[in-house]
Structures are given as structure tokens and as C-alpha cells.
Amino acid sequence: MELWVSGFNAWGQLDFQSKASIGSPDIRTFKCVLQSQHIEILRTSLSATLVRTSSEIEEAGNLDDLLQLCVTRKDGLSSVAIAGNEKLAEVSGNSIKEYPSLTSFMNNDGQHLGDFEYFEQLAANQTTFTALSNSGKVWTWGDGRYESCLGREISEECPAQLPCIIEDLLDLPTGPIRKISSGGYVTAALTSGNDLYVWGGRAGQPTLLDQLSGTPEPVDLDGQDVLDIAVGADHILALTMERRLYVVGANKNGQLGLDVNELSKWREVTLPLEGRQIVSIHVGYKNSFLLVKNITQ
Amino acid sequence: MTATANRKLVDTCLRVFCDSEKLAGLVHSQTKSKIELRACGNPVLKLLLHLSNAIKNREGDFDLVVQRLDDLIALATEKFYAFPFKDVPPCWRDLFREASLLKFSALAVKGMWAHRNESFDLRTPSEEQMDEMVKTIDMALIMAGPPPSSDGQEQITSVFDLLQEIHEESIQLPKHDSPRKRRKVDGDTGVWHDRFPTSGVFEPSVLKPISKWSEPSFDEFEKYMLHPKDDHIGPEPLVIEGALKHWPARTKHPWKSPAYLLSKTIGGRRLVPIELGRTYVDEGWGQKIITFKEFIEHYILDPKSSALATGYLAQHDLFAQIPSLREDIAIPDYCFTSPPPPHHSSPLAEKHSKLAPLDEPLLNAWFGPARTISPLHTDPYHNILSQVVGRKYIRLYAPNESEKLYARGVEDGGVDMGNTSSLDIGLLVGWDDSEEERKEANERFPLFQEAEFMDCILEEGECLYIPVGWWHYVRSLTVSFSVSFWFN
């Protein structure tokens, strides 16, 4: 497998090849930085990247406290998500807990927000948490100032700060949700039938995408089915079933891997991948990660 | 000499703003530090230290150093939005300020980047460099607030003084007189007139003139306030003549001269917050931060040429930002009298009485073109409104008229608008909009016609005493620059 990267690299969080140092320049076109029999992205943060290869856990950049904890536990802690406002959420089984900060999480000083369904995924953006259950339902909660990010209405029964279901994502034409991703002020969801939905936006900020609003809207990528989605701080990646990579959003740090200032409409990025294809996509803070495999494998 | 000012500036940047020792101390301290910046986390501190060293030694890729500082400023800005305003952890404001001061320093030493020896190439910063430097540091003050320590605040003040000095030297040298700096000239005559336009806007007639008094003494004024004609109303507004005649702003440092105002703001480079839209209660009202020069050129000197909204530099403490303008005015002695407490007839009297006594009067600048309107409202302090440049129509209603004035309440988003009236005076009296709209508005607010008022046109050089709790509506008739002095 190969790891391809592009984007923000201030702490050398993309430099797996060389022993990186602080002050590295950004990487502005996708390039391969790591090869191994097996690569799995455990976690990304503002300043570091943690991957598991067939032999070991490898880090790049400068570890912050949460990634340090991941290294100690040899785990990506995927049941934990941290928002831009420093709040932290944790799902375990049916239950959701919220902590005011990483420190309170370490001290196990959190608040139980309720028991719902068995959770499989958890994501956070600047102010919102999103959780996905094994039956494909999506719960959101967070800062009520940014109602669009919740993808649902705020009401007395469903206040902003408590997990509530996004009803618009129930009974979709192509089935329940199978994947969620969140970043900046945007959240995205993929159905089991491979349709992509997005919602969010922040008033006063130019929207990443034309159709962004407070209700989940389907995204059309030349009519293709969507295999994977990754939402960053100010950019989005989408991978179609035909293994074509689409990008949109800011490019100040090269996170789109294209020679453009920014994109308000989706554009395809083509990479020199003879005999190989992208199998999954990931984002960090203003950077992008692609896992690439030989087609014959 | 510019070289001296420039050397001092570079010196401050390298020795004070690039504080690598402090940053290194924070990176290596494992214990909780009193310095808030610590809370940004070690990666951020290490990057700041790296950038500080790069600037100190003027090594590495200059553009990358500036980009990384912009990245950190962007990170801090993202945090300002992620938290409710009151909950933003102080470390992110500090990061915004530290990164901005480092960026300022990088720009200041740009000319000698990659020259590590001490024989500085002390070229005066270019126009563009000056633009960027002033913008960087002003933006930090506006977004992150002044440094918490008084030392830090003094350093910022001295940096602005040095920039002002560098600017003044540069405009005296003819070789620096680039065409870019020459201001717009009169289209017909081709001559630059150093004055504000005198436009003819509609002028309301004064129906109930406020009494005037030429230079009352301190005691006379205090007595005027403490012994009102009518105890049911309390002290009444008063136009004071002659009180500003010694102000430098009206004599040797004329604020009616655009060139003077531009010269005091580092060539118009200082950033100011501007209110856009006719009044702050209008839909689509907004604020933006622009340079003083843009404000003067687009909103004051040439407001008709563009389709821009009315821009108003309103209720801004310009004098804290630009202390040298503060020296052009003086706090009127009247502000140091002991005024009576808020009059019992004011529905806001109790609220206003709870305000702590001010150590010093609160100063605000009000600078805008003709046609700015401050809608009918009350303030929590007595006010000496001083008219330095231009003319304004002002209409006042006593506190005991409050129930005819339809005060607004707590509105969507929890903002208390109880000090602002729902009444649009210009519409209700028929100065603006159509006759039909006037009738409609009067039907909606039937008590308005019964409300007693007083009015005046405040002329250049006059002051208006507005007692606390009095409702006032202010409409500029020309380009106008006023200073309000709040006291209690």
C-alpha cells in the first residue's frame, strides 16, 4: 500500500520519508510519502499524523496531547472526537458522553448525554458532534449558534446541546447512512447505496459549496456513486466508485493538490497511478491523505 | 532622521517582539505557566519559537515564515468563531497578537533578510511594506485587544510613534512622493482642495430652539444643572458657545483638513471600524474595518461617486487608538462638575443610577459624511457633544416623554434595545420617504405627535449638553466630526 499526501505541513506532519522538522513547507501536489504492506490512518490533528503500518505505529509532525495519548495506548481512539471548541465526545456501546476538554476526559470528568443505539462512528467539526449508529441513523448535537451544522431543527424536545436524530436522513432512496465525516462547519454522510449528502455552513463565511444549508442536500458528482468522503477544516474530498478523486474548497495550503487558489465547485484530481487505485481518503487540518493499492491485490 | 526611527523600530522588533527566550521557556516548562499562551499547546509554541528565531536571525525562506504566521493568525481566528465571544480562551487572543507582532517584525526586517551581520541595510520600508505593517498590528489590536501588560501597551504605542515618524520623514523626501500617494484632485479645476465637500442636503427647520449660553463658567453650568427651571423635567439641554475656541483641532491642527487627518494616521493607514448603512437600526446595517484613507476617500470626500452605503465612524474611541489626535482636544471643564443623578421621570433612571462613577469622562469620535443619522436613543451618562467640524441637526425629548416614544425591548438574540426608540423621526415628520409612508407611520405610533421636543442645529465650534436619559436624534447636515464626552 501507499500513502499519498498534499497540503498543510507546518510541523512536518506529512513528512514520513525524511525525518521531518518544524518549519517544513506545504506539499502542493499529491505525492507518495510512505509504502508498506499495510497502512491504516489512526488519527490526524492540527500538528501531527499517526499511521499504523504492518510493522509499527509511525508518527509525523509534532504530537499534541491527544495524539500522545493515542501513541501510549497504541490506538487511534476512534470512539473519541474533539471539536474546534475543545469539547470532547465519546461513544461507547449505546451511550454518549461529553467532556468540556481533553483534560476533563483524562480525569474522567464528563457528562452522560444519554443512551441511544449502538454507535459505530463519531465525528466532530468546529462546534458540532455527529454520531452514526449501526442501524444507519445519525445524531447531532453542539453549539446552537450554528444551527445549520446540526442538520436538524432546534426545538424544546431537541435542544442543540443534546443528541437528536436528523430525520431528513431517515428513509432515503438509497438506504441508511453507512459513513459520516465532519470538519470546519460542514458534515457529510454516505448512504449504503453510495449517495452523498452534505449540510452546514456558517453565516458570514463564504460557503464551501453552493448547496450548503441547514438540511442535508444530495451532492451530484457526474452521476457517480460515492465510495468515500472526507471533510476537512475548509476543504472536502470525495472518492467515487470509479476511484476518481474530487475536491472542493480552500487551497491556501495546497490541501486540494491542484494549482488553484480555491474551488467553489467540485473538480477532479487525476494522479499518475498506473496499475494502482485509491482505496480510501482522509483529511487532517487543511491537508489530505489518500491510501493507494495495486489493482491486482 | 528616518534611519534612527527605523533602527529603533527594528530594534524593538528583534529584542521585544521576537522574544525567543520567553517562548523557549514556555516550550520547556512542564508545569502550568501563568502565561496564557501555554494553553495553545506545545506544537503551537514550538512553531512560534521556530519563527521567532528565524526572524531574529533573518534566515530561512522569508515568504514561508510570513505564511506560517498567517496560518497561526488564521488558526486563532477560527477559534474566535468556534467559541461564544465570552468563552474564547485567552490563549487564542494571545496567539493572534503574538503571531501578528512576529509578522510585523518579519516585515520590518524584510530589507535585511539573509544579512545576518549587524550592518543593517536600513532602507526605509516601502509604501507597501508600511501598509502591511500598520494593517498587521492594528488588526491585532482590534481582534485580540491590546497587550495585557502596561509594558506591552507602551511598546505598541512607541511602535506606532516610530511608524508615524518614518512616514513623516518619507513624505518630506521628494523621491518618495510616488503618484500613488497623491490624493484625488478636483475634476473641474485640477486643483486639490484640502477641505471637505460642502454638500446641500435637506435641512430641517428648528421649531423649538434650545437655549444658548456663551461660555458659562464652571459654577454657572453646575448651577444650571442642579437647579432646573422645571423640577418635573430636570436639567434641560443647553447649547454652549465658544467653549472650543482654544482647541488645536479648531486652530493650528485643523480637523477640517483632510490632509491633516491623513497625516496623523500614518498616511491614512490606520484601521478604523466603520458602520455601514443609514442607521444602526436598518436592515442590512453592518460594520467593516477599513483604512482611514479608504474611509476619507470613498465615504467622506466622494460619497456620491460610488454606490457605497453611507459609512460612519461612530462611537469609536479613536483617541485611545491614536493618542496624538487626543492632544488636539481638551476635556471641557463642564465634564468635571457634579451633575444631578438621573431624573426620576426616566424609565431608565434606576438602571442608569447603578452605573459606577467614571474616573474620567468617556471619549468617543463621530466622523461621517452628510446624511448620517443616529436614531432616537438615550445614553446612560450626561454628555457634552462637541462639534469640531460641520453641522448637525439634533432633536431631543425629555425623559418624561418616554412613553410616547415607543422604546424597543430585548430583541431576538437577547440584545437589549431598551435605550433605542422604534420611532424613525425623519419618516414621522416627513423629511424622508413619501407622504403616504409618513401617514402610515403616524398611525402606527399615534402618541408621537403629542411628544414635546426641543431642537437645534449644532454649529461648528458649539457644544450641546445632553442630560442623562434625554432621548436624542442626530442628523448630519454636512461632513461632520464630533466628539462626545460622557460623564456622571
Image (spheres, coloured by chain):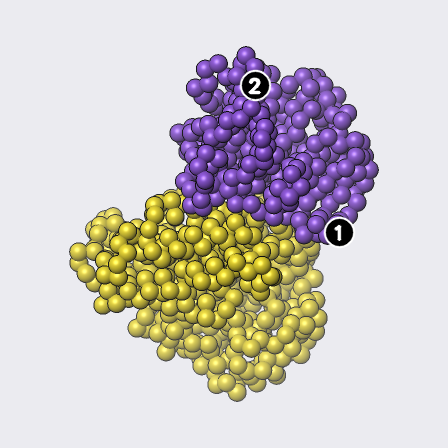
Chain colours: A purple, B yellow
> To which residue does mark 2 refer?
A240
**Secondary structure beneath label 2:** strand
Name the outermost residue toward the front.
A55
**Secondary structure beneath label 1:** loop
Residue B273 locus on image (x, y percent): 46, 55
Q: Earlier in the sequence, mark 1 or mark 2?
A: 1
B180 and A225: which is toward the camera: A225
Residue B423 visible somewhere in the drawing: no
Q: Quadrant of the N terminus of chain B?
A: bottom left
Residue B110 locus on image (x, y percent): 30, 53
- Amino acid of disc 1: Asp
Which chain contains the residue that carries disc 2? Answer: A
Left or right? Give the position of A22 relative to B406.
left
Q: Is residue B306 above or below residue B109?
A: above
A226 and B170: which is toward the camera: A226
Q: Is residue B139 above or below residue A291?
A: below
Q: Which residue is at 47% across, 50% downward?
A: B47
> To which residue does mark 1 refer?
A109
Mark 1 or 2, which is nearer the eye?
Answer: 1
- Measure how far apart labels 1 and 2 are at the Cα level: 41 Å
Name the outermost residue toward the left.
B175
Residue B322 locus on image (x, y percent): 40, 66
Task: Classify mark 2: residues with Cα within 10 Å, few (<14), some (14-19) or many (20+).
Answer: many
B484 and B25: which is toward the camera: B25
Name the outermost residue toward the right.
A115
Left or right? Give the position of B185 relative to B28.
left
Which chain contains the residue that carries disc 1? Answer: A
- Amino acid of disc 2: Thr
Q: Which residue is at 73% across, 45% downward?
A: A98
Residue B263 locus on image (x, y percent): 31, 62
Q: Which residue is at 39% across, 48% downward?
A: B66
